[in-house]
Image (cartoon, rainbow, N blue to C red):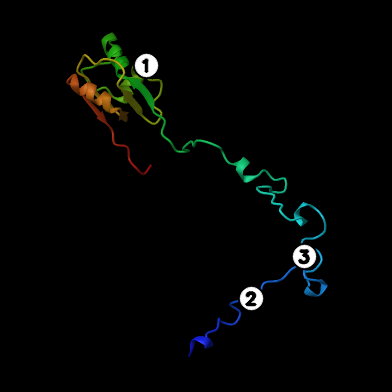
Amino acid sequence: MKLHELRDNPGATKKAKRVARGPGSGKGKTAGRGIKGQKSRSGVAINAYEGGQMPLYQRLPKRGFNKPNQKKFAVVNLGLIVKFVEAGKIDASAAITEDALVASGLVRRKLDGIRVLAKGEVTTKLNIAVTGASRAAVAAVEKAGGTLTVAQVAAAE
């Protein structure tokens, strides 16, 4: 085989249809564009128009995203826990659990768990066991000589 004998496979290439080249071509006169109207003219593009249907760019939300399966935590500040302990509504000698926080009336309901934040001063030694806590809250409780344990939630729920 020589270079001049190389050929494409039969049917691999096809000649382009030359439109608007007379009635004998089968695509003469209007060149397959129909008669009149915006789409028969040159230089017209009706971008994003979907024939009256609400276009895709209008159907999509424009900004942000809300995770459909996100966890919702009840939030408690350390200062409030200390206040309730001082008022005698929470027993500081035992471990302060989520159920104890709900029973004391500090939290209305647990939701997906209770998360402790660091707002407020910790003066007494507290042993707290909750679902979540900020790093600053853990540091503040440990500085006061207590412990703040965060429960490990199972990944596959």
Residue denoted by label 2: 14
First along the sequence among labels 2 and 3: 2
Residue denoted by label 3: 31
| Quadrant of the image containing the C terminus | top left
Residue drawn at 32 percent across, 15 percent down: 80
Q: Is 76 on the left or on the right of 1, as rendered?
A: left
Residue drawn at 25 percent across, 24 percent down: 128
| Type of the residue with mark 2 | Lys
Rendered image quadrant of residue 101: top left
Please tell me whether mark 3 or mark 1 is closer to you in this view. 3
| Type of the residue with mark 3 | Ala
- Residue 38 versus residue 19 in the image, above or below: above
Q: Is 131 on the left or on the right of 30, as rendered?
A: left
Describe the element under mark 3 as helix, strand or loop.
loop
Residue denoted by label 1: 105
Furthest residue in direction left, as rendered: 145
Rendering coords of residue 140 (x, y %) = 23, 21
First along the sequence among labels 3 and 1: 3
Describe the element under mark 1 as helix, strand or loop.
loop
Mark 2–mark 3 distance (CA, rounded to whole Å): 19 Å
Is there any visible trace of residue 45 in the rendered image?
Answer: yes
Question: Are there few (<14), some (14-19), or many (20+) residues within 10 Å of tag 3?
Answer: some
Mark 2–mark 1 distance (CA, rounded to whole Å): 80 Å
